[in-house]
Amino acid sequence: MTVKKFLLTFNPEIAGEPITYRMVKDFDLMVNILRAEIDEHGGRLMLALEGSGPQIQKAVRYLEDSGVNVQELKEFIRKDDTRCTNCGMCISICPSSAYQMDRKTWKVLFLNEKCIACGMCIDACPPGAIRLRTQD
Ligand code: SF4
Ligand code: SF4
């Protein structure tokens, strides 16, 4: 089983399409919606797809054929260690425990694989050491 995160951007014409329903039914994938923003201009949906690699590929092809812009989120957050003061604010705010204090060095570590791309840590970091990163 593979888990991949994606950012889907779509226009108002297809905003009403039952995308998550089709992911589950037609492609046998588990869908976890991480973030959704929909308005009259369209929408952005951040989700995690869990299933076999080929099924995820087929689902992505279906989305693209339907007019959805699909961007894989290999890395959502970038922590700049040169700016980080190890204050620990991100540890207390992150809902998925993607930040942890290294008890030997007392430095805050970022564990990318735990990040669910909620974005809450970005504004919470006092020195602005956490940035959004959606591309390699
Ligand atoms: S909130 Fe920012 S400065 Fe504080 S530990 Fe986290 S990344 Fe470092
Ligand atoms: S984006 Fe959300 S889940 Fe990811 S590290 Fe920041 S607070 Fe944690």
Image (cartoon, rainbow, N blue to C red):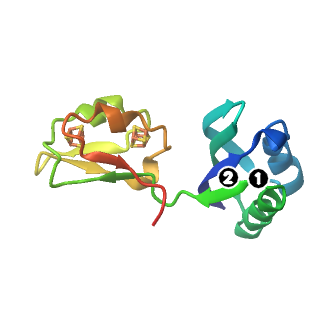
CA gap between label 1 and label 2 equals 6 Å
Instruction: Find residue 49 and name its label.
Output: 2
Quadrant where the N terminus lies?
bottom right
Disc 1 marks which amino acid? Leu
- Indicate the quadrant where residue 12 lies: top right
State left or right for residue 25 relative to residue 45.
right
Classify the position of ligand 1 by quadrant: top left, top right, bottom left or bottom right.
top left
Q: Position of residue 31 (x, y in %)?
A: 71, 45
Quadrant where the C terminus lies?
bottom left
Q: Earlier in the sequence, mark 1 or mark 2?
A: 1
As drawn, 134 above or below 20 = below
Q: Position of residue 133 (x, y in %)?
A: 42, 54
The secondary structure type at the circle numbered 1 is: loop
Q: What residue is shown at x 44% (from left), y 48% (from top)? A: 114
Instruction: Find residue 99 and name its label.
Output: none
- Look at the image and tell me whether residue 3 can be seen: no
Mark 1 close to ligand 2, CB under 8 Å: no
State left or right for residue 105 relative to residue 135.
left
CB under 8 Å between discs 1 and 2:
yes
Disc 2 marks which amino acid? Leu
Farthest residue, direction right: 26
Q: Position of residue 58 (x, y in %)?
A: 80, 65
Q: What residue is shown at x 70% (from left), y 68% (from top)? A: 53
- Look at the image and tell me whether residue 133 can be seen: yes
